[in-house]
Amino acid sequence: MFVLAGPAIASDGSAAGTECGVKSHALIPVETLGPGESLLVPVWIRGDRVGAHTLSMAIGASTTQSTRALTTGCKMRTRKFEIDLVVTPSLRVNAFVRPSVQNPHERILGIEIENVQSGLDIQLVQSTFTSGHYELLPLRTGTTPRVVQIGSKQTVNLMYKARPRARDVQAQPEQFTISALQQYIFAKDKPTAVPAPIRLVHSNAVLGHQGIDSTHSSLQAYIARSQAHRRRTMLRNAYPLIPEKFHSALFPLYETFGIDFVLFWSETGGKGRTGHHSITGIDLGVPHDYINEALTPPASGAARMWLKDTEHDRQELIQSIANRSAASAHRTERTLDVALRLTGVRRVSEADALCVADIEVSVYNHSWQHAYNATLRLISPSESDQASETKPESSGPQAAWTWCGVTTHTLSVDPLGSVCVQAQVACSALGIIDVGMWELSATAVNATAATSPYAKSLECKLHPLHPSFINVTI
């Protein structure tokens, strides 16, 4: 008769450790088996990573007369098993970001979901977003079904608009990182302060008949662990010259403008398998590479030398951080943007086909730190020498309209603020025209002069990236 060994228990009641320090999972309690008897042990395995894996299992047994030997290190019979597993994906989930033509301060977030399982239809239960700045709202239409089902080998897209929660956010995690990183690079004492907690926004879109509480349950801990794992991996790769023990004092877990996404699903009919998939650290493309600001020495006093490091080591660290910023700048930074909206159309006279369209021009500032003084120039198609530089590709007519009245506006935009000006377009024919022709020159207000060669200029000149169509009708 044999006894299947569970975890070894020390004399004080705690689990005894192993010499190699490898953590193991006890699958069964101590059981007694008679001659010819068998025991079925169900093992549930969660496949977090797609691919081939090897599962190692060990079974230890001893006779009932020496059961105490399990805790004294005496001889026992052991058997090791290795089981090869292949984890196949259930869903393939990707995220993509598009700018909002209607509201430049918002972003359109698309989630592409493909059911790669064979012979299994699923239905989506809920999508959950966590962010420090954005509230996610679904873009629903009149034909959007209440319950979203995905057949085998089928794909659906869920569209959401990311709307800023408040326009007075101070981006405390980013400001903390700038100050802490400056202290780490230029001061003698290393930073030890803990970042202030960030107020997260949880946006839930219920896709089934019943929602899931993801803020007061173990699911929230799962989301935080996923974010922590992604954050640690990213920091190790981005800042190889900064020891990992300083990461918690330099970089908060959550940034203001990042988004975490979790999708919950179940088998069709509410029975059978359920699951959830997550994407952490979705970049909405809102530009502000604040890390470069930490490479400028602080204004109060000259930078002091480190006790153990040389000036060469400091410059090597600064260059490493600057190279990280250059490598990650895969998109053009666009701190400000412009939106045009038609507010009214009137005919100049009954005998004349000339119409005047009233246009509201809004200038948005995406920067959380700098206010800008800007000059907006509205450019007509007749200004052919400038139109080629300020006009994106479009199929709309170019010769049937012109800006009239005041075409140059001087304005100031607060951090994360917006300013609206009124303009007019004269049209010789009705129809849809593209009036997206403008040039915006801006300079940051009261910006500290950059003393580091790695600091980016706070002056910018912007042109439209997308057409701005209006429908001129009477």
Image: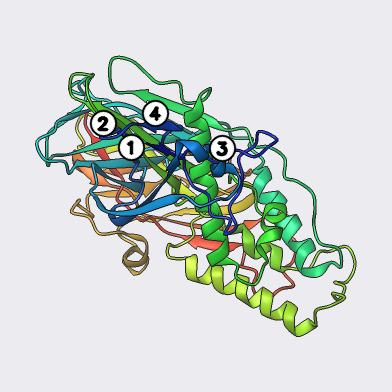
Question: Sequence-wise, which precedes: disc 2 or disc 3?
Answer: 3
Question: Sequence-wise, which precedes: disc 4 or disc 2?
Answer: 4
The label on residue 43 is 1
* C-alpha gap between disc 4 and disc 2: 44 Å
Q: What residue would you read off at disc 4?
A: 137
Of residues 178 and 433, the one drawn nearer to the viewer in this rendering: 178
Q: Is residue 356 left or right of residue 10?
A: left
Give the crowd class for mark 4: few <14, some 14-19, many >=20 residues within 10 Å.
some
x and y percent of residue 359 in the render? 39, 38
Tell me whether the residue at label 1 lies in contact with that at label 3, contact meaning CB atoms closer than 8 angstroms: no
Q: Is residue 473 left or right of residue 360?
A: left
Q: Which quadrant is the C terminus positioned in?
A: top left
Instruction: Name the residue type under label 4.
Output: Leu
Q: What residue would you read off at disc 2?
A: 349
Q: Image height check: is 436 above or below 6?
A: below
Could you say whether the residue bearing mark 1 is in a helix, strand or loop?
A: loop
Could you say whether the residue bearing mark 2 is in a helix, strand or loop?
A: loop
